[in-house]
Amino acid sequence: MDEIYKSLVNREVPLAGVGEFAPIEIGRLSVWPPVVLAPMAGVTNWPFRAICRRFGAGLYVSEMVTARPLVEGRAKALMLAEFGADESPRSLQLYGVDPHYVGRAVKWLVGEGAVDHIDMNFGCPVPKVTRKGGGSAIPVKPRLLANIIRAAVQSAGQVPVTMKFRMGIDDSLLTYEDAGRIAEEEGCAAVALHARTAAQLYDGEARWEAIARLKQRVKTIPVLGNGDIWEAHDALRMMRDTGCDGVVIGRGCLGRPWLFRDLADVFEGREPSDPPSLGEVVDIAIAHATFLCQWAGEDQAMRMFRRHSSWYTKGFRGSAKLRARLMQVTALAELEDVLRAADPSEPFPPEAMRVPSRQDRRPPKSLPPRRLPRKSPDRRHPPRSTSTPPP
Ligand SMILES: Cc1cc2nc3c(=O)[nH]c(=O)nc-3n(C[C@H](O)[C@H](O)[C@H](O)COP(=O)(O)O)c2cc1C
């Protein structure tokens, strides 16, 4: 990889040595390279996961699905819980504040053979949620946290349950060490720490030292680190600096799913390739948009794809003008016309490697409703995708 694509902080970082890192053992799942796609609401549906999986390996977690609507068989929840036909392992993130619904949702998912891994979300920082004691405020109530986790683990049988959380509400109320202890006591298979507080949202640099501290405290299950991995070499640095067992990749792969190829390379001790030119990025974007149309229907997909269009074209020459046109697109063919009109030989802009766009900081968008039958999950087939499998 050309030096221009490596931040100063990564220029001297050696590639992984033979045997330096091991697969993450999450219950009966063995994950190599030790890389996990972070659950991201409105983003990590099966079309996006399918695109990421083309480039690398690891564990690719679904966007968050809320337990109660899933149990009630609501169309949106069932849609979010869909997987690509050939997707393996099938990893789903679940959110719930009530152990009863969490237990029922897990029992149903597992009973239907629908998932291979469940991640519990205790990191949502949205004030509307935390004010009611939900999301990242749940770990403030250790008994409730333990009850939710217990309900999930007991209902999951052999399917591993992990949990993802933040450092705490703010610097005066740090809960991550207690959360790690509870995860171990209640039988979680791994924990992931987003090394920021809820009050920070996505601001400031992630505090990797908290990941190191959690790793020292949590001895019996893998500890995964999350926050600010923009380049593959950041992952090596995080693992070496903190001793964590694996990394969770969020915004770094938005518009850049080939980050998973780079990650696979560095963990195998290979120098990664240069990022793709605009023409190659356009091919990836069109494949992604095509899957999204299969999943959500063309109308909704085109609306959902607007933020991806911004991410895919970020930093390229003339991208502001291009984006203005992309925001108007209402059909897949039109999207292709607009993207194909751009100069395919345009090289990837080095300045687009790390900087989070303002859009990344917006609260997660919710999915528009889709016409699906409202059936109770008790009577419905497992949420395997009925869509065309990704190639
Ligand atoms: C658009 C968006 C949606 C997100 N949705 C979720 C979610 O549903 N569940 C969750 O646990 N974290 C969610 N997150 C947080 C990420 O999983 C991750 O913890 C965070 O982005 C920090 O990692 P990063 O610095 O690599 O981006 C979301 C983040 C973004 C940017």
Image (cartoon, helix red, strand yellow):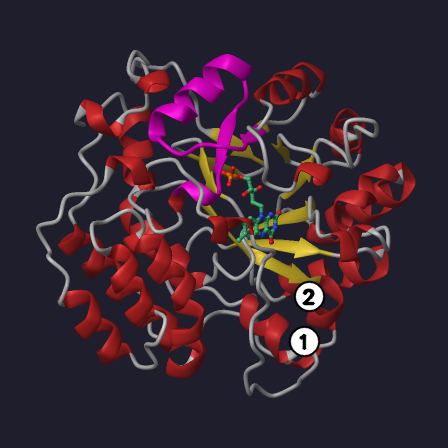
**Figure check: 19 above or below 288:** above
Residue 181 vs residue 172, the one in the foreground: 172
Q: Looking at the image, do the residues carrying marks 2 and 1 touch, with CB atoms under 8 Å apart?
A: yes
Kind of residue sitting beneath label 2:
Trp
| Left or right placement of residue 329 versus residue 107 in this view | left
**Circle 2 — which element?**
helix
Quarter that holds the C terminus? bottom left
Neighbourhood count class around disc 2 (C-alpha, 10 Å): few under 14, some 14–19, many 20 upward: many
Q: How crowded is mark 1: few (under 14 residues within 10 Å), some or many (20 or more)?
A: many
Residue drawn at x 60%, y 24% is 207
On residue 108, the disc is 2
Q: In this view, does 84 lie to the left or right of 141?
A: left
* Residue 242 shown in magenta: yes
The magenta-colored residue range is 224-252
Q: Tell which of 106 and 226 is nearer to you.
A: 226
Q: What element carries label 1?
A: helix
- Examine the rendered structure and indicate whether residue 112 appears above or below residue 243: below
Q: Front-most of 237 and 72?
A: 237
The total number of labels drawn is 2
Query: Looking at the image, is 347 positioned above or below residue 77?
Result: above
Residue 377 shows which numbered tag?
1
Q: Which residue is drawn at 31% across and 42% down?
A: 56
Would you say 74 lies left or right of 181 here?
Answer: left
Residue 363 is tagged as: none
Residue 339 at what x, y percent from top left?
20, 66
Q: Please, what is the three-letter code of the amino acid marked with disc 1?
A: Pro
Q: Is residue 391 visible?
A: no
Q: Which image quadrant is residue 104 in?
A: bottom right
Q: Distance between the residues labelled 2 and 1?
A: 7 Å
